[in-house]
Image: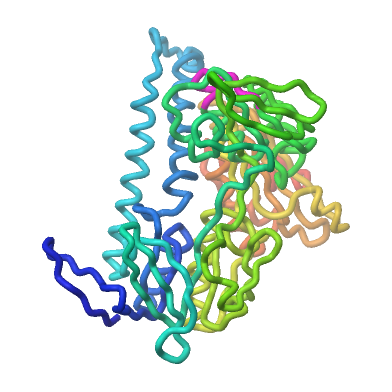
Amino acid sequence: MTAAGKSTRNGQKRMAQSEVARFDIVVIGGGPGGYVAAIRAAQLGFTAAVVEREDRLGGTCLRVGCIPSKALLESSHKYEEVRGDLAQHGVQVGSVALDLAAMMKRKDDVVGTLCKGIDGLLAKNKIARHRGTGRIAGPGSSPGDWRVEVSAPGGTTTVLESPRVIIAVGSQSLVLPGVEVDGAVVGTSTEALSFDAVPGHLVVIGGGYIGLELGSVWRRLGAKVTVLEYGERILAGIDADIASEALVQFRRQGLDIQLGARVLAARAVKPAGAVVECEGREPIHCDRVLAATGRKPATTDLGLEAVGIQLDKRGAIAVDGLFRTTSPGIYAIGDCIPGPMLAHKAEEDGVACVEGMKSGWAHVDYDLVPAVVFTHPEIAAVGKTEEQLTAEGRRYRKGVFPFRANGRARTINDTVGKVKVLADEVTDRVLGVHIIGPAAGDLIGEAAAAMAFGATAEDIARVCHAHPTLPEALKEAAMAVGGNAIHA
C-alpha cells in the first residue's frame, strides 16, 4: 500500500480528496463476509482494505441481527425459566421483576465487545479500515485497477484503487407495500431489538425465523404477540413435519399465530399505537408492529451499472463459481448474491472467494449450509427436506428419534422435539438432517460435518457418542434409518 498523508493535530493522518491509496484487494462491506474475506486475504499475503459506512464493524448480523437477538433470546428465556420452570427442579424463588434496561445493556455490551474484537483482528492482520460509503467509480489510474470512492460521514472523500474489489454489502429488511415503517411504532427487526418498554400488544408480520425469534422474546417478557403469516405454514424452507411441530409448540407458549393472513397495510395511528389491515379480516389495533417479511440484497447506490454489473429482479448480483461478476476484477459474496442469506454462508463465501484469487479454485456447497432458528425449542436443519426429496423423485429412508427418550434431555427437563435423519434408500448416504429440540443449533454441526464427507446413516450410527448427551439422539435417529434404534 502507498499513500500520502497530512498530520492533524491529534497525530493521525487523513487523506485529501486528491490522494489515492492502493491495495491488492478492497472489500466494500465490513460484515461477516467482508471482514472475513479481508482477514483471509491478509493471511495469503494480499494487502487489503475494508470499507464500512457504519461506525462499528460486523454488519447487520453483529450490530442489529444475529448477536443482539440471541442475547435477548437467552435473557428472556432465563426470565421465563425463573418465573415458572425452576420449580420442577426444586428451586423456589420469590418475586421476579424485569429490568428491561439492564437486559438491553447486557445485549449492547455483548455487541460492543464483539465489535471491538473485529477491530482488533483487522489491526492484527494489518488491514486498513475506511469509514464511509463505498462506491465503484470506474477504472483506476493504472491498467486493470478499479477506483473505489469512499464518502465519509464528515463529507470528505477518499479514493482507493485495486485490481480486485469484493462487494460484500449484505442485505436489508424487505418491507411489504402498504406497511409504513416509521421506526417508532411500525419498525423492522432493528427497532424490535431496542424497545424501551414491553409493548402491550405486538403484531409481527411474517412467520419466518426473524419474526418468531423476536416474537418469542417479547412474549416471554409479557407482551401479547400476534404473528400474521401469509402462507399456510410457518418457517418456509424448513422441513414441513418439523415446522408443523414447531407451530404446535409456539401456540402452546402463547403466540397467536394466524396463517393465511394477507397484510394490506400497517401504520401508526393517533394518539398512540398502530393498526394492521388484513384481507378479509377485522383490523388489528396494537401498540407496535414488527415487519419481518424477509430481506433483500443491499445493492443500490454502488455504481454497479456504470461498470457493467446487472442485478436480477431481487437485486442480487450474479457470480460464477469463483465469485466473479461480469466485470473482470470485481467479485461479490454473501447476502448480495444468490444463496442462503446467512452470516456463516457469507463467511464461507469470503474465504472461498479470496482463496480462488490465489489458487484459481473455490467451492461452497450451498446444499450443506445449516439453518438454525433460535426459538425454544430450537430448530436446525441441513440438507434436503422430505418435500424436496419427494419432488425430486428420490427414494429415501427415514429415521426419527424423540428427545423424550434421551437421558440427557430428561435430566435437563427439555424433552420436546426429535431428530430426523433422511438417507438414500440404496446407498444409505445421508441426504438431510432436521432437528427440533434442545441445542438443535449445536447438534446440527455434527450432521453437517458428516454429510460434507459423504457419510452414510450407518457411519453416524457406528460412531461412539458419549453418554448421557444430546448428540446420542442423532446417533439413535441414524440407527433408526435401518430400523435398529436401541432406545426408541
**29 up-or-down from 198: above or below:** below
Answer with left or right where residue 398 lies relative to residue 339. Answer: right
Residue 169, visible in the rendered structure? yes
**459 up-or-down from 174: above or below:** below
Answer with left or right where residue 233 lies relative to residue 222. Answer: right
Kindly identify the residue that appears in the image at 61 percent across and 78 percent down. Answer: 308
Residue 479, visible in the rendered structure? no
State yes or no: residue 13 in magenta. Answer: no
Return the x and y of residue 43 as percentages of the image width and height: 36, 74
**415 up-or-down from 464: above or below:** above
- Please tell me in which quadrant of the rendered image residue 30 appears: bottom left
Q: Nearer the viewer, residue 245 or 111?
A: 111
Kindly identify the residue that appears in the image at 58 percent across and 73 percent down. Answer: 323
Q: Quadrant of the N terminus?
A: bottom left
Q: What are the residue bounds of the magenta stretch?
A: 218-226
Q: Nearer the viewer, residue 245 or 439?
A: 245
Return the x and y of residue 369 as percentages of the image width and height: 61, 57
Residue at the far top: name it.
94
Scheme of colours in the image: rainbow
Q: Quadrant of the C terminus?
A: top right
Answer with left or right where residue 443 lies relative to residue 234. Answer: left
Return the x and y of residue 60 as percentages of the image width and height: 47, 50
